[in-house]
């Protein structure tokens, strides 16, 4: 089975190109369309394919690496990481930090849930 990275960047979209790129690679990696160990194109290579500045692709790759979705192995390239566990741990840690902070701020559990619900809807457009 041949795996192909499929990215479409809409320059008329209000979402920044690097974020479109980040979201699409992340989604494909998390869904399994890009398997763990899949080698991503070089920054310059992908920038050329998509008609983007190399810095735009590099910014997306940095964000993906920070999120644990990809890993750079020096001169060997950039690969899809085993992100499921890392992403879950990072999300749980962020949720715990949020819960501890709102408790210190004196918010009730209901207020904390309401605030996080509003934030999720704002981010996901729901």
Image (tube, helix red, strand yellow):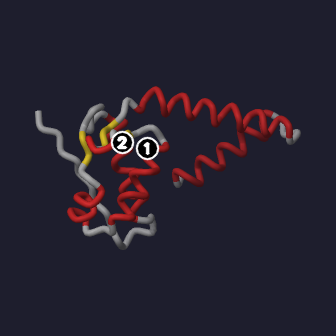
Q: Is residue 37 above or below residue 53?
A: above
| Disc number lying in front (2 or 1) | 2
Query: Is 75 displayed left or right of 93 in the figure?
Result: left
> Neighbour class for label 1 at 10 Å: few (<14), some, many (≥20)?
some
Seen from the viewer's position, the closer of residues 68 and 108 is: 68
The label shown at residue 72 is 2
Q: Position of residue 13 (x, y in %)?
A: 39, 68
- Quadrant housing the N terminus: top left
Q: Which of marks 2 and 1 is nearer the N terminus?
A: 1
The residue at which mark 1 appears reads as: 65
Q: In this view, does 28 lie above or below 89?
A: below
**What residue is at 48 percent from the left and 30 percent from the top?**
86
Query: Is 107 displayed left or right of 27 in the figure?
Result: right
Q: Position of residue 36 (x, y in %)?
A: 30, 31
**What residue is at 38 percent from the left and 39 percent from the top?**
71
The label shown at residue 15 is none
Q: What element carries label 1?
A: helix
Query: Is 32 displayed left or right of 109 in the figure?
Result: left
Seen from the viewer's position, the closer of residues 28 and 122 is: 28
Count the marks: 2
> Neighbour class for label 2 at 10 Å: few (<14), some, many (≥20)?
some
Q: Is mark 2 on a helix, strand or loop?
A: strand
Whether the residues at callouts 2 and 1 have beta carbons within 8 Å, the answer is yes
**What residue is at 37 percent from the left and 40 percent from the top?**
70
């Amino acid at each position: 089975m041949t795996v192909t990275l499929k990215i479409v960047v809409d320059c008329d979209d209000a979402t920044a190109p690097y974020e479109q790129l980040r979201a699409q690679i992340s989604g494909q990696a998390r869904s399994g369309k890009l398997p763990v160990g899949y080698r991503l194109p070089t920054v310059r290579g992908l920038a050329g394919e998509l008609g983007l500045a190399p810095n735009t692709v590099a910014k997306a790759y940095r964000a993906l690496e920070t999120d644990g979705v990809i890993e750079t192995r020096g001169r060997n390239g950039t690969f899809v990481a085993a992100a499921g566990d890392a992403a879950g741990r990072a999300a749980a840690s962020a949720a715990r930090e949020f819960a501890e902070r709102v408790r210190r701020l004196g918010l009730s559990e209901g207020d904390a849930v309401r605030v996080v619900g509003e934030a999720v809807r704002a981010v996901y457009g729901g």
